[in-house]
Amino acid sequence: MMQYDDNQLINRILDGAVQEYSILINRHKDLAFTLAYRLLSNREDAEETVQDAFVKAYRNLKGFRQDSKFSTWFFRIVYNTAISKKRSRKSTFQWIDELPFVKESPDRSSEEEDMMAERGSMLDRALQRLSEDERVLITLFYINESTVEEIHGITGLSKSNIKVKLFRARKKLQDLVELMAQRVYI
């Protein structure tokens, strides 16, 4: 089967191969969920937000200008949908579900798996203590490997503001993880 890039897929979808939208969904669903979860801190709300964002993207696919990356355009939709959901949400409780940060590897021993799971859990707890903007920036920059330009397109923040906030978020995250590690090993 031929491997199409996002823009080729979009052209095929617009030409009538609507079933190929599932390929775009599969490519972008994990990061979309991570981004929504970082903003909403609730698994169910994040899943609903991602579904809504995929529907919005599909309905507006004809309006997508292919001079930028589909992922940037789509993650902007996810970001805006999550922000809207957050504003409309009446309750302020948080679920303490863990995201699978660390993929299991068959080469690791049980002890190594436990240590990696603890590190992933610690990192996730530290991320939850960051502000909404900081979580989003860390997720986009490090997990999605988005450029500052792409993050600007998604969040609307200025490039210099992104750089400053990323610097501060990295430092804050590092301090939080170090503090948590000290508590674990004391």
Image: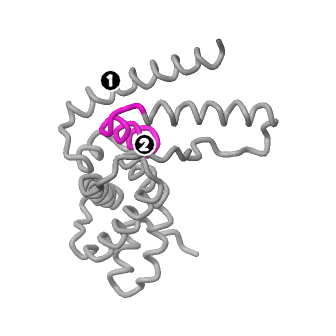
Determine the residue positioned at 33% across, 74% down: 58
Residue 111 at x, y = what percent? 79, 31
* Kind of element beneath mark 1: helix
Q: Earlier in the sequence, mark 1 or mark 2?
A: 2
In this rendered view, identify the residue nearer to me: 11 or 38: 38
Q: Which mark is residue 58?
A: none
For label 2, the crowd category at 10 Å Cα-Cα, with few meaning under 14, some 14 to 19 and many 20 or more, is few
Determine the residue positioned at 50% across, 66% down: 26
Q: Quadrant of residue 104?
A: top right
Q: Which mark is residue 145?
A: 2
Q: Which mark is residue 168?
A: 1
Q: Locate residue 123 relative to residue 66 in the image: left or right.
A: right
Queried whether the magenta region covers residue 125, the answer comes back as no
Q: Amino acid at mark 2?
A: Glu
Q: Locate residue 162 relative to residue 139 in the image: left or right.
A: left
Marks 2 and 1: in contact by CB < 8 Å? no
The region drawn magenta spans 129-144
Q: Quadrant of the N terminus?
A: bottom right
Determine the residue positioned at 41% across, 73% down: 9
Which marked residue is nearer to the observer: mark 1 or mark 2?
1
